Amino acid sequence: MNKPRRTTSKQVAERAGVSQTTVSFVLNNVEDANISTETKERVLQAARDLNYVPDRAARSLARGRSNNIALVLSQPHAQIWIDEYIPKILTGISQATEDTDWRILVQFDRTGTRDVYTDLLQSKEAAGVIVNFSHPSSDDIRQILACTQQGLAIVSLSNIHPDVYSVEVDKFAGVQKVVRHLISQGHHRIACISYAPAKTNPHADRRLRIFRDTLREAGCAYDPKLVRHGAFEPDTGYEAMRSILQESPHPTALYAMNDVMAFGAYQAIYEAGLRIPEDIAVVGFDNIRLANYVAPPLTTINEPDVEQGRRAAEMLLALIDSRQPEEKHVTLETQLVVRRSCGARQRSESPEKGGYSF
Amino acid sequence: MNKPRRTTSKQVAERAGVSQTTVSFVLNNVEDANISTETKERVLQAARDLNYVPDRAARSLARGRSNNIALVLSQPHAQIWIDEYIPKILTGISQATEDTDWRILVQFDRTGTRDVYTDLLQSKEAAGVIVNFSHPSSDDIRQILACTQQGLAIVSLSNIHPDVYSVEVDKFAGVQKVVRHLISQGHHRIACISYAPAKTNPHADRRLRIFRDTLREAGCAYDPKLVRHGAFEPDTGYEAMRSILQESPHPTALYAMNDVMAFGAYQAIYEAGLRIPEDIAVVGFDNIRLANYVAPPLTTINEPDVEQGRRAAEMLLALIDSRQPEEKHVTLETQLVVRRSCGARQRSESPEKGGYSF
DNA sequence: TTATTTTACTAATGCGCTTTACTAATGCGG
DNA sequence: CCGCATTAGTAAAGCGCATTAGTAAAATAA
């Protein structure tokens, strides 16, 4: 281990013929330090000459906080690849931190027992944390609240508690959009494939209830025999749809709670010799990239994921800076993207060509 | 800004009735410190009581290096969502760092001008860096070499220079597998959709050359009229295929350089009233999750992305630790995953059901 | 001219840990 | 019982920066 002896601010100071303090003032643009322009220039030149890069650890230690924000992922790995959600959130966070010297820490929370975000904050590895719970336990919430009350910066990607800052996408309204759209197309026997059993997954449960309520509000019967649950993956959508097709009469429409399961359902529908949308209209959820490139292109709900990531990061940076964010809970809206699979005349809520947006 | 005054090791020391040195020895499991079991227990208890979490910045400063490794992404954002590559690499890295206290820093290299990884390493924000260049400039390479020679730990996800450590997937051999498979099925008019013009993208160029050479080695003619390039996205595959179908006679097979473009091509083929694989056999590349759930399921090349990420991280940690990795360049093999789109009897190189592996 | 403010800096301290050098106490062979 | 090694610790220095309190010189006010 040859120590290459990094350049320190002291060396810069020496070369510029000033004190280390002055170097620090110049490099951090301290307003009321009254450093003359010539001195400033001399310091900057010296720093350039010596190829000086400040030591982040030392800076963090002296300042009492780091320049990292963390994204804590609590879902299993495989789920992260399924849709483009996490990469898009990351993109959004990165947009918000562009041209700043904030860095992004990604932490997979595999254990589930230890509270990673607390450690992250207490160890000052991250000055703030963005968490992404699918369905937090009351323990999780208590933990987060404790952090928040200690003044630690946490933003959640779903609204989990009135006192926890959040930026979320209103998926539930999205469910209504789907159902109302199908009903407006004349469907009243609408099947549904959920991504998890309602008993175990509060989220899936709530979506299903909204599905049911929206049907009823429109005067349609809710038929539990037309509901199945898969588990995110395409093959579970395939199996669920095969099972649904045992019912008779057939439903005339299907709402799959994610696009990926919808693709699986496509398969089952085709195998049964049925056509989309003539025999069964299909609507998905998520607007993944491929939704526009299956046959027929899938009508679905688009979620502003990148914006969600960006807004969450912006809110987090405000919190870290002790600036009060304008709202404690931001809600972003989804858009219905109408394509051929639902049988409607093509007309998209979103302005872009192809309806693919972020 | 109320300062909650974190617990420090000094307080732990006080409570345990020992010196701060002892606390450090105990918490870091220093072998030759000869701390008695009782003292150890007392320290650990005190740390637990006070809910002590060490300050990472202070630790990094004292140790002279941080406990972060960074993944530097140089591709544009949109490309990151297209396939599951980056999330899988991240998963792999996270597997390698599981149960250690290494953290993962994700850095998007948007500027292209500044050398982010150098900064990352010089500022000691990261003890090592994994870089992912699609086609590095000679400047990039010089930069990386300079870092490597300074003893900074860098691992590349592609083999860009004999002296730069790398873990890569041999995609070129994958191209051969595709072509040979198609030829073995009796095809000799094989179209190809590349993801970029050969002139501008050395990678695409090389893949295309291998495509051509493999054809010729097998005694097949290479017909440049059957070659188009898209740009990663499904619609570009659609357009490319439409254009290819203008040629006559039709090719009997298509090799699309990624699955996503293959899906676009499906669309074009169906619109032309042709069947897959009867009229045109299709093979993709990447084995994305959905490849198995389009109609017909897509024959493709599977890449061990998660393993690549894991191996790269392992190599990096070895380098950081000044352990010489066993090999300077690791090459991982792809597998041909045979599904229905190529018309062959289903037989997969990979053992798993559905051929989906990582 | 003298007192006060402003300008342009610097010395010194401390952030919270790791690590080196040192010490006191105990064990043990001869 | 002495000398030496071992055991079980501790004191203190230092990592590289930010920051506070202070100072000398120059500018301005009285």
Image: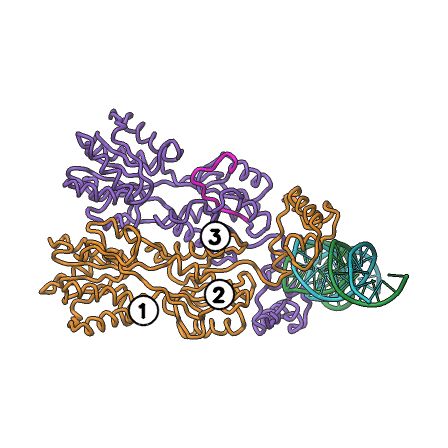
Chain colours: A purple, B orange, C cyan, D green
Residue closest to the eye, A109 or B126: A109
Which label number is shown at residue A106?
3
- Callout 1: helix, strand or loop? helix
Q: Which residue lies under the disc numbered 2? A: B117
Q: Is the residue at mark 2 from the same chain as the one at mark 3? A: no
The image shows residue B24 at horizontal and vertical percentages of: 67, 54
Q: Report if the CB atoms under discs 1 and 2 are less than 8 Å apart.
A: no
- The stretch of residues the image draws in magenta is A128-140
Q: Is residue B3 visible?
A: no
Question: Left or right of B250: which side holds B200?
Answer: right
B61 is within the stretch colored magenta: no
Q: Disc 2 sits on a residue from what chain?
A: B
- Identify the amino acid type marked 1: His
The image shows residue B201 at horizontal and vertical percentages of: 31, 69
Q: Is the residue at mark 1 from the same chain as the one at mark 2? A: yes
Callout 1: few (<14), some (14-19), or many (20+) C-alpha neighbours within 10 Å?
some
